[in-house]
């Protein structure tokens, strides 16, 4: 039996299901306190009593990102505003933004789940944890912070960036655990070379990769170069943040905490559930979230449930590594971006024509976002300086929206490829 | 005042070939040619003998603007450009670009891109420089 943080980790399936049903009914009554769910339930005449078994969950329609955007900011808040102790927020402005709220209990439960995840991979009191994820509106930084603190870790809240200093800290303070974006972990290998330091000579024992998906091949490359295991962490702000699912030392899929979430995998086109083992879109129902419960929320992440029990002995099922998205969202340096965000910024500028192309590639180890923009014929006034300031203006406006700074390339009208049918707006050259 | 053409172009192989081909096919003769580039993008400034034809030909294929520039005749000797620059500096007029042609053993024409064309022409005229119009410029350099 594994050394568990919480006995629930190995609870028999029947106990888990019973727990889920009770928590689901609670979630429905809690959700009804938000304007969005109240409206939804009234229209369908649903209440906690409508759900007599877990199977009845099907009677509740899906909730999507667009519902959250449309009901921004407080339409999904299920507690009085003064009960909210934390807010996290996506990038994006009007029409594209998502706010996620937490009560004290939500924050504590999140910390508890993270502690459970970290404990599962061997983290203990006394581990020196360098949290290299941004602290701020995104959930990666603060999310792992409170969970690690709960376990008694010595936390170095570096956030991202400042590569030389990050490595110095690893040496001086004898960091044993990292939380980092995989592409940044790759980029740091270059800094190690520059500094003449071999990462394998550090005190590191393990790393947690988050905020962006990466391939098994990339993981192996990182583990090889750093000399420590890289564990996968899955989460989404709407469900709390990181820690919704996490790998155990087997590294064969991510245990999703079924005491806190109900998992469904659906065919993204028909909405029907697929069989265990089959790939589909992950749909999640929160079971403990108080400030902003969500029921049957479509994550747009593609995965499958791994049907066999895990050798580690935990009874919470595992998700396969995320394969992709069922929408057009992409991730650059850990930040979620929708092409529509870029389009809206460009279309609000009269100097920009109808055609643009988003190109994502890697410059050495680092993700790079380039937006190629066709000018309108009238936008060119004859001077290079004016083109340069237009380029800067576009880059600045995009940065405000995306929170990532893209390179902007101005191109002559009519030179970007035109396609028949649906325009291809994004070319992702990283592989 | 005469006009020059400014063409917006990406800084990549083949662009100059295309622009010069278009001009050649339109039977346009180039008087002056200047490329300014910043990374991936550039602006090409061209003085030609048949501005309207060149403008039409280039517009059909790309992004081009006409812009007024000042053509001024000066003696071809040391200090000539300095005198012009001093006059304009005194009046607070900025010079964006200059090209020059020696047209005989003793004379030159300067073509100036300036921040204020009418003011520059007035001030240079007051300083007794000869400002050329389209016909006079063509006669001098053609």
Image (cartoon, rainbow, N blue to C red):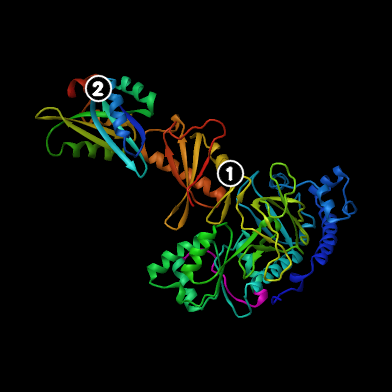
Residue A370 disc label: none
Q: Is residue A158 magenta?
A: yes
Q: Is residue A204 above or below residue A320?
A: below
Q: Position of residue A115 (x, y in %)?
A: 67, 71
Q: Is residue B130 above or below residue A38?
A: above
Residues at circles 2 and 1 in contact by the CB criterion of under 8 Å: no
Q: Is residue B91 visible?
A: no
Q: Is residue A154 above or below residue A219?
A: below
Nearer the viewer's eye, disc 2 or disc 1?
A: 1
Residue situated in front as seen by the camera: A101 or A304: A304
Q: Which residue is mark 1?
A: A341
Q: Which residue is mark 2?
A: B49
Q: Is residue A48 visible?
A: yes
At x 31%, y 39%, the residue is B36
B23 on left or right of B102: right
Q: Chain of mark 2?
A: B
Q: Around disc 2, counting alpha carbons within 10 Å, would you say few (fewer than 14), some (14 to 19), or many (20 or more)?
A: many
Q: Quadrant of the N terminus of chain A?
A: bottom right
């Amino acid at each position: 039996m594994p050394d568990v943080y919480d006995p629930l980790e190995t609870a028999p399936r029947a106990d888990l299901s019973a727990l889920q049903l009770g928590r689901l009914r609670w979630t429905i009554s809690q959700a009804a306190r938000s304007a969005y769910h109240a409206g939804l339930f009234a229209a369908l005449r649903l209440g906690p009593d409508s759900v007599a078994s877990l199977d009845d969950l099907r009677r509740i329609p899906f909730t999507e990102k667009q519902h959250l955007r449309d009901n921004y900011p407080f339409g999904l808040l299920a507690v009085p505003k003064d009960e909210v102790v934390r807010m996290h927020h996506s990038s994006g402005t009007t029409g594209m933004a998502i706010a996620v709220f937490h009560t004290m209990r939500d924050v504590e439960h999140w910390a508890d789940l993270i502690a459970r995840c970290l404990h599962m991979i061997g983290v203990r009191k006394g581990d020196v944890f360098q949290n290299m994820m941004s602290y701020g509106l995104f959930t990666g930084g603060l999310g792992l912070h409170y969970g690690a603190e709960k376990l008694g870790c010595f936390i170095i809240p570096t956030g991202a960036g400042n590569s030389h200093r990050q490595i110095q800290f690893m040496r001086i303070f004898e960091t044993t655990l990292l939380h980092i974006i995989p592409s940044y972990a790759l980029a740091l290998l270059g800094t190690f070379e520059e500094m003449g330091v071999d990462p394998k000579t550090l005190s590191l024992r393990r790393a947690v990769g988050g905020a962006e998906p990466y391939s098994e091949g990339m993981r192996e490359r990182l583990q090889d170069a750093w000399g420590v295991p890289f564990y996968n962490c899955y989460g989404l702000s709407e469900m709390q943040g990181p820690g919704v699912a996490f790998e155990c030392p087997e590294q064969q899929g991510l245990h999703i905490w079924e005491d806190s979430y109900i998992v469904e995998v659906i065919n993204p086109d028909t909405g029907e559930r697929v069989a265990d083992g089959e790939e589909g879109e992950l749909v999640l129902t929160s079971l403990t979230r108080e400030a902003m419960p969500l029921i049957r929320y479509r994550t747009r992440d593609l995965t499958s449930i791994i049907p066999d029990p895990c050798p580690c002995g935990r009874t919470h099922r595992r998700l396969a590594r995320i394969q992709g998205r069922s929408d057009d969202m992409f991730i650059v340096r850990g930040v979620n971006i929708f092409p529509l965000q870029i389009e809206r910024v460009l279309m609000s500028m009269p100097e920009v024509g109808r055609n643009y192309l988003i190109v994502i590639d890697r410059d050495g180890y680092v993700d790079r976002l380039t937006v190629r923009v066709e000018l309108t014929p009238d936008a060119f006034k004859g001077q290079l300086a004016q083109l340069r300031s237009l380029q800067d203006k576009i880059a600045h406006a995009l940065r405000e929206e995306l929170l990532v700074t893209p390179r902007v390339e101005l191109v002559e009208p009519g030179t970007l490829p035109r396609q028949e049918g649906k325009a291809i707006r994004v070319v992702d050259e990283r592989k | 005042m005469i006009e020059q053409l400014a063409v917006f172009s990406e800084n990549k192989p083949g662009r100059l070939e295309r622009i010069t081909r278009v001009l050649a096919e339109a039977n346009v003769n180039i008087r002056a040619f200047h490329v300014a580039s910043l990374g991936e993008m550039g602006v090409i400034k061209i003085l030609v003998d048949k501005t309207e034809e060149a403008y039409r030909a280039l517009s059909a294929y790309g992004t081009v603007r006409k812009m007024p520039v000042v053509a001024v005749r000066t003696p071809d000797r040391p200090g000539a450009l300095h005198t012009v620059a001093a006059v304009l500096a005194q009046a607070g007029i900025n010079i964006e670009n200059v090209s020059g042609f020696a047209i005989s053993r003793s004379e030159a024409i300067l073509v100036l891109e300036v921040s204020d064309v009418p003011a520059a022409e007035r001030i240079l005229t007051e300083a007794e420089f000869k400002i050329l119009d389209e016909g006079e410029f063509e006669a001098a350099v053609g």
